[in-house]
Amino acid sequence: MQPAIEQSLRRVDTPENRLILWIVLGVMLAGLLLFVVRVLRRRRMARRLHQSIVSASVEYLENVLVPDGMGAFLHADYLLLTSRGVVVVDLRDIRGNIFGGDQMTQWTVMNGAVRTTFQNPQHALYDRVAAVRSLAGDLPVEGRVLFTRRAKFPKGLPRWTLMVDSLRAEFPRVEADAGRVLGEHFSENWRALCAAVGPSSLRKRRNFFAQVFIEGY
């Protein structure tokens, strides 16, 4: 039995088969390396996007659940304490040309030859802003649907929508001293708002290995 096994292994262990094995291993390693590079790039882009958003604020909350006063909770991507009060941010990372309007129920996305639609995000934003206002006391509250650079609006931006690169222009960053005064002025209401909301897992970031092996970037 043993000689037969050894003879079979010798027939399999040929230079041609070893070459094929090394090629297969090389392809698998290259594919894994490509996934890792893509994940690292996406994580770097996500950090830059996050910094672009929070740089317009004195303080901020990220991924929170806001009670709506009727026993339910609304997810908010960001709550920014800015020079004008609180800004509720609904972040949308959509690629393509977007066609939408204030009175439209559905907005259309054209990405090459692919056409998709999504619900007008303004309506959900109004609900989020109303929920935050009920908790913010004297703090002014407004909202923006914030789109990343991957989106284009050929017909112009609908109301309450904003591109991420324009956030700092609309809500200028305050200097350190002014920010301290602003924080003191709004601190009580801001602390009450922070205490009223809770963490949300809706946009919880997956760990590195989950991104590589599960999400398939």
Image (tube, rainbow, N blue to C red):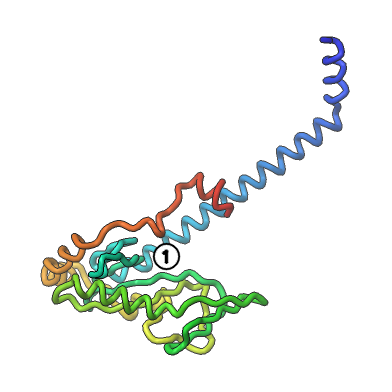
Q: Position of residue 188 (x, y in %)?
A: 11, 66
Residue lying at the far front of the rendered structure: 70
Is residue 182 left or right of 129 when viewed as pictured?
A: left
Q: Amino acid at mark 1?
A: Leu
Q: Compared with residue 216, is residue 175 higher up or lower down, i.e. above or below?
A: below
Q: Position of residue 140 (x, y in %)?
A: 20, 78
Q: Hey, which quadrant is residue 128 in on the image?
A: bottom left
In front of the other: 83 or 3: 3
Q: Which residue is mark 1?
A: 49
Q: Secondary structure at mark 1?
A: helix
In front of the other: 168 or 117: 117
- Number of marks in the image? 1
At x 84%, y 10%, the residue is 1
Q: Crowding near pointer 1: few (<14 within 10 Å), some, many (20+)? A: some
Q: Hey, which quadrant is residue 113 in on the image?
A: bottom right
Q: Position of residue 129 (x, y in %)?
A: 28, 76
Q: Position of residue 68 (x, y in %)?
A: 26, 70
Q: Hey, which quadrant is residue 178 in on the image?
A: bottom left
At x 39%, y 86%, the residue is 159
Q: Compared with residue 168, is residue 50 higher up or lower down, i.e. above or below?
A: above
Is residue 26 left or right of 144 when viewed as pictured?
A: right
In front of the other: 135 or 173: 135
At x 30%, y 62%, the residue is 65
At x 34%, y 61%, the residue is 63
